Image (spheres, rainbow, N blue to C red):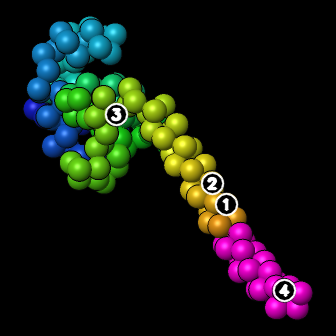
Amino acid sequence: MRKFPRADFECNLNDLMLCLFSETASDIALLCGVGIETVLHWRDGVEPVPYMAWQLIRFKTLGEVPNFCGVWSGWRFVENRLFPPMSAAKGAITDIECKHIHDYRIDRNLTSSQSELIDCLIRQRDFYKKQCGLEAKFGLMVTNLFG
């Protein structure tokens, strides 16, 4: 008789075993809303693990966002960090950064508006510099003619 878990969908058997055996049967039963006997049947391979139960257990034990979450699927929660799919540790977002995301947006908008202002000031400076040169030449010409 089979003594390891199985699923009717494609999944990594190592991850499936890790998820089912790293938590207690009662915790998994409570999480999935099933009886402890059902969880024990999943562990022994008597019954296949349902897809939605697998997604919930995987989220709890491995921190992976379930596939049905659209653009967030593939992201992982590890301790206080949120990892994008296929990223290293330096690509993770901390909980503090998530709390300050509004400030980052304000800073980005402020930087953009300051950049536009600096460009405008540089154009004005160049215009007035050119104008001062022209007016100085014109003033010298008037002084030579009438002065």
Q: Position of residue 10 (x, y in %)?
A: 34, 46
Q: Real-space Cα distance between discs 1 and 4?
A: 39 Å
Q: Nearer the viewer, mark 3 or mark 2?
A: 2
Label 4 with label 2: CB-CB less than 8 Å? no
Query: Image point 72% across, 74% down: which residue?
Result: 132
The residue pinned by badge 3 equals 97
Magenta span of residues = 126-147
Cα gap from disc 3 to disc 2, whole angstroms = 28 Å
Q: Main secondary structure of the magenta part?
A: helix
Is disc 2 surrounded by few (<14), some (14 to 19) or many (20+) residues within 10 Å?
few
Dot 4 or dot 2: first in sequence order is 2
Which residue reaches farthest right?
146
Task: Determine which residue is flagged by label 1.
Answer: 120
Q: Which residue is mark 4?
A: 147
Q: Quadrant of the C terminus?
A: bottom right
Q: Please tell me which residue is depicted at 60% across the width and 49% down the height of the picture.
A: 113
Q: Amino acid at mark 3?
A: Glu
Q: Tell me residue 84's x, y (percent).
A: 35, 46
The answer to which quarter of the image holds residue 56 is: top left
Disc number lying in front (1 or 4): 4
Give the residue type at disc 4.
Answer: Gly
Pinpoint residue 21: horizontal percent, then vertical percent: 11, 27
Q: Element under label 1?
A: helix
Circle 2: element type: helix
Residue at image coords 32%, 15%: 32
Residue identified by numbered label 2: 117
Q: Nearer the viewer, mark 3 or mark 4?
A: 4
Residue 137 falls inside the magenta stretch: yes
- Residue 73 appears left or right of 86: right
